[in-house]
Image (spheres, rainbow, N blue to C red):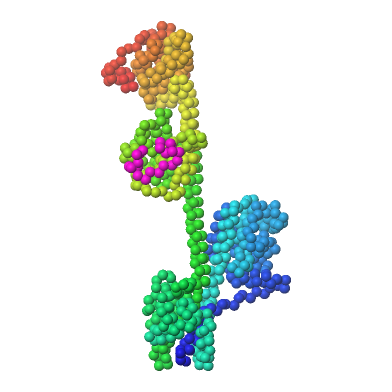
Amino acid sequence: MDKEDWLAVAEAVIEAEAAELEPAAVEVVPSPATTPSELARVAALHEYRLLDAPADDELTAVVRAAAVVAGVPHATLNLIDENRQCQLTTVGFEGADSARGDSMCALHFESGELVHVPDASCDPRYVHNPWVDGRLASVRFYASAPLMSPTGHALGSLCVFDTVPGQLNEVQMSVLEDLAGVLVGLFERRRQARLAAEQAEQTAEARELAVLAMNEAEARWELSEVVADTVDVGLAVAGPDGHLTMLNPTARAWYGADVDADLTSAERARAKALFAADGVTALGPEETPLHRALREGSVQGMEIVLAPAGLPRRTVVCTGRLMRRSDGTPLGAVVAMTDVTAARTREAALTQAHDALAEAHAELAEHTARVEALAQASRILVTAEDPHEAVCEAARNLTGADGACLLQPGPDGSFVATASVGLPAVPVAVGADEPSLAATAVKLGEALFVPDIAAHPRASQQLARQLGIASCVWQPVVLTGNRTVGALGVLWRERRDDLPAHVLPMLQTLSGEAAHVIERADLLARLAEAAERDPLTGLANRRRWDEAVAAEIHRAERSGAPLTLALLDLDHFKRYNDTHGHLAGDALLRDFAAAATSCLRTIDTLARWGGEEFVLALPGCTAADARTVVERIRAVVPHGQTCTVGIAEWTSGLQADEVVDRADAALYRGKQAGRDTTVLHTAPGVPLQPETAPQALSAPGAGSEVGSVATAR
């Protein structure tokens, strides 16, 4: 190498060493009472330059995550210097500086261990602390994870607390310690960024120094070879043709070339070891830093990976330039390589930790949203007027399905839909012997997911076509003790080959809630029905009769339509009961109720009045119409028995009991006339018109208006 070569090498060495310069540490002036270890700790804290500076969003997000993990409303990031505790960022309260002597965390943060206190008011270490005794706050539950720098200095703590006692499980404590590590990692990243900026500034200053150094290099060029051999920066020099003219020992070791090997051998080893920054793409001869410096005039911050066979991979940053002779002709190029492998490893670890935190936060947000949606669905179920439809709506909303259906078992083993949403308005019922996915799920005792209904042997294909569905999930709705309430179906029109992992657990939870709510609603409906029905005959009882006849009188009063009431009495019932027994008497009452009901319209009301007496309301019927109706009933009295009927037509202004009294008077007259007759109530002095035997019935549509009305029953 000639003199100009060594001048170029000297410039490259100076630039590389400038890149490694560290900024001066922040000077800390300790008090006389400060120990050497405390001096070092405070110096490490000030090195991060966090005190009295606003916290960024990343630090705040980690503190907020700590509060969520601990399940408490309060969390803070505390930094502790010589005299104070600085609350850099807080969650759930306004942070402020406070004296170090008042700090709970200052008692233990240098131990490096997580502190967990279920109730600070019961802990002698804290019972008189102003954060506990009410002067600053009333902390009860308290947990603190220390913030330890990579050099082992305690910087402060990540603290979570509440005003009521509590405690963390092992997982929560472990996550709190991990979050404290993330905070220190973020401190380190900020410090590294600041150092990098300072280094860049110092590098610029170093370049200016390099110009001066080059002017003085003539006096020092003999030393350059020694520098090149000892510096821990890799140096490579090439001639104008691109062939190596010098590799310092550091560069030779990185390339995997022997220190004493000739340059031709070293160049071959170098050609095999160069890769792009991704560590995978091999660099061609024209893409190496030296060739780019020759071609482009300079290379700044080019990052490459050295991966020689059998040696560790190394990431280096290359800076170089084209060298010219005094006449301007190219002399060659020099490149200095700085090893940044450790820095890139730290950056990768920080990025990975940040990504993991973001992923955990996103998963937590999704889980929280699903839990809230399930809680909302439970609240709606409890308060819904019709829980059957509410559970279908909730299932559809929670799963994103097109429709949902609730099937409940009948006494004969069939399944009948009691509610549905998002489905065509077609009757849904599956017989006990028909194929049924709902029955299959109930039999299995677990959710049944069917991606392709058309291919499933237990699916009702006709029902699938009617509803227009391709995939479904059937979840049994079962009470404790395996008593089946029904089966909840979630249905999709388009085929679904798989389900998100949360769908089946949410359906199972919803069905558990629904089982109790639906059972309670069905029970209340049965109780309401039982409260209005005669237990022997199933007819309306006196309570239901009073409500129904009052409504009919109100309607007749408003519309002017006729209304007739009748009392029916089974003749000689006591004798029948005594002769055939009480069970036979009960059977006669039941059979008569069924036979009489078959002769009536749905708007008519037949109730058991008491014993063998029944009362009948016929809205829209005159007394003459009513006679035709009751004659139909008298014609179907079972077991060869007869009945006597008294009829009274309501007139405006009469109350129900007054009309019933008139019908009862007509009934009494019928009994006096020998029973087995129908008697209409008439005004005083008008002779009764009994009919002692059921009359022949007119054909539908024939005869008078009375015949038409009666036949329409």
Q: Please identify the residue farthest to the left as the structure is shown.
A: 702
- Please state which of residues 238 and 51 is positioned toward the viewer in this rendering: 238
Q: Indicate the position of residue 234 as horizontal and vertical percent values.
A: 49, 80
Q: Indicate the position of residue 299 as horizontal and vertical percent values.
A: 43, 80
Task: Mark yes or no: residue 585 visible.
Answer: yes
- Please state which of residues 442 and 465 is positioned toward the viewer in this rendering: 442
Residue drawn where x is 50% and y is 51% of the image: 368
Q: Is residue 514 magenta?
A: no
- Please state which of residues 636 and 566 is positioned toward the viewer in this rendering: 636
The image quarter containing residue 598 is top left
Vertical arrangement, residue 132 with respect to residue 201, above or below = above
Residue drawn where x is 43% and y is 75% of the image: 273
Vertical arrangement, residue 63 with respect to residue 208, above or below = above
Please state if 45 lies on the left or on the right of 200 as rendered. right
Task: Mark yes or no: residue 212 visible.
Answer: no
Q: Is residue 457 magenta?
A: yes
Please state if 281 lies on the left or on the right of 147 as rendered. left
- Please state which of residues 469 and 135 is positioned toward the viewer in this rendering: 469
The image quarter containing residue 653 is top left
Residue drawn where x is 41% and y is 76% of the image: 272
Q: Indicate the position of residue 176 as horizontal and vertical percent values.
A: 58, 58
Numbered circles on residues, count: 0
Residue drawn where x is 37% and y is 79% of the image: 286
Please state if 691 lies on the left or on the right of 235 as rendered. left
- Range shown magenta: 439-459
The quarter of the image holding the C terminus is top left
